[in-house]
Image (cartoon, rainbow, N blue to C red):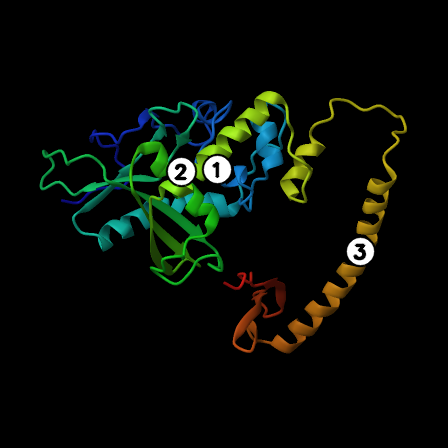
């Protein structure tokens, strides 16, 4: 039987409570994710491990304060467009298993714990009239332009820590014990990974989430950090403009001025370093040092260079 990955199926539910099949970006979807709740995509920010969202920004969002508006990037757009195709590839690689749209869920005992997995995984029914047993796992579909954050195909530790947090939270929300990852890298490199439930990790995340939500209730704002989205959040806080002088601490003034000077010097040094690397690459594609990839060149149609981009280097184990 040919099964579409985009069809909603009336299959038995996991232990969580289904809120609904909500379209990302709609008012209903946003409502299910705002207020004093923590979703699977937010839990990594709670523990300070998200590369996209800071604790500072998440705190403001949960407190009902202003944050910078969501911006649809090409990476997000194409990740959404390719999700069904990658999910179908996973189904083809796993005969006897069906990945059906999951919807938005909350934990049965903790109403504030939310998750919107990409797919629920069921045993493939023998025919279209048979209803399979309850879902036993989840499928997460990801796309990545370069894949530097992902390990080798099938590696036990191949999933980036922020996605591992997401997977543990999803399982803890729905009462399941395995998440499969189907990942498309650079548009052609397909990889798979598995994350199994870990009660100790789940408890760490739950405790951190409860403390975070309590800090929101108590008005305990996280300290300002160096994340770009923290700066964007602070930018949108003022409501008005007063043409007055505001006295600030001397140490903060010195930190700002020194950082400005260091940035100017770093920019000059970076330009020199990029020029040296690009000159070495010439008409090539990548710069390597002792077998390690350092940077890659993106050419224009005429062969000249559009940009030189660094490879992200993982921390040594």
Q: What residue does disc 1 label? A: 43
Q: Is residue 80 above or below residue 93?
A: above
Query: What residue do we see at 56% from left, 42% from top?
Result: 48
Q: Is residue 121 above or below residue 271?
A: above
**Residue 197 percent coordinates (x, y):** 33, 44
For the residue pair 212 and 13, the one nearer the viewer reads as 212
Classify mark 2: residues with Cα within 10 Å, few (<14), some (14-19) or many (20+). many
217 sits to left or right of 226: left
Q: Residues within 10 Å of mark 3 (few under 14, many from 20)?
A: few
Residue 36 location (% of width, % of height): 50, 23
- Mark 1 touches mark 2? (CB < 8 Å): yes
Left or right side of 247 for 2: left
Considering only order in the chain, which callout, 3 or 1, is on the residue closer to the N terminus? Answer: 1
Q: Which SS class for mark 2? A: helix
* Real-space Cα separation, disc 2 to disc 3, in angstroms: 40 Å
Which residue is identified by label 2?
169
Q: Is residue 11 left or right of residue 231?
A: left
* Alpha carbon distance from label 1 to label 2: 7 Å
The image shows residue 181 at horizontal and vertical percentages of: 35, 50
Q: Is residue 265 visible?
A: yes
- Quadrant where the image shows the N terminus: top left
Q: CA distance from mark 1 to mark 3?
A: 34 Å
């Amino acid at each position: 039987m040919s099964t579409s990955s985009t069809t909603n199926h009336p299959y038995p539910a996991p232990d969580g409570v289904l809120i609904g099949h909500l379209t990302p970006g709609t008012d209903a979807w946003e409502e299910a994710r705002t207020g004093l709740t923590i979703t699977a995509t937010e839990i990594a920010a709670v523990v300070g491990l998200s590369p996209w969202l800071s604790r500072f920004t998440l705190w403001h969002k949960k407190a009902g304060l202003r944050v910078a508006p969501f911006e649809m990037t090409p990476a997000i757009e194409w990740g959404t467009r390719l999700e069904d195709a990658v999910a179908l590839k996973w189904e083809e690689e796993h005969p006897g298993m069906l990945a059906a749209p999951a919807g938005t869920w909350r934990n049965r005992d903790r109403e504030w714990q939310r998750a919107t997995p990409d797919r629920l995984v069921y045993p493939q029914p023998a025919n279209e009239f048979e209803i399979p047993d309850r879902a036993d796992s989840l499928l997460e579909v990801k796309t990545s332009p370069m894949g530097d954050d992902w390990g080798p195909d099938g590696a036990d530790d191949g999933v980036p820590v922020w996605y591992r947090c997401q997977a543990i939270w999803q399982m803890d929300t729905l009462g399941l014990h395995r998440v499969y990852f189907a990942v498309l890298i650079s548009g052609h490199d397909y990889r798979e990974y598995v994350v199994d439930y870990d009660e100790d990790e789940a408890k760490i995340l739950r405790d951190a989430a409860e403390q975070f939500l309590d800090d929101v209730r108590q008005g305990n704002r996280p300290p300002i950090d160096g994340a770009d989205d923290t700066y964007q959040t602070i930018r949108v806080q003022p409501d008005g403009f007063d043409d007055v002088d505001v006295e600030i601490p001397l140490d903060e003034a010195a930190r700002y001025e020194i950082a400005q000077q260091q940035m100017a010097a770093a920019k000059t040094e970076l330009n020199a370093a990029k020029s040296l690397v690009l000159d070495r690459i010439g008409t090539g594609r990548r710069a390597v040092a002792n077998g390690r990839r350092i940077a890659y060149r993106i050419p224009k149609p005429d062969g000249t260079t559009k940009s030189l981009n660094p490879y992200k280097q993982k921390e040594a184990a």
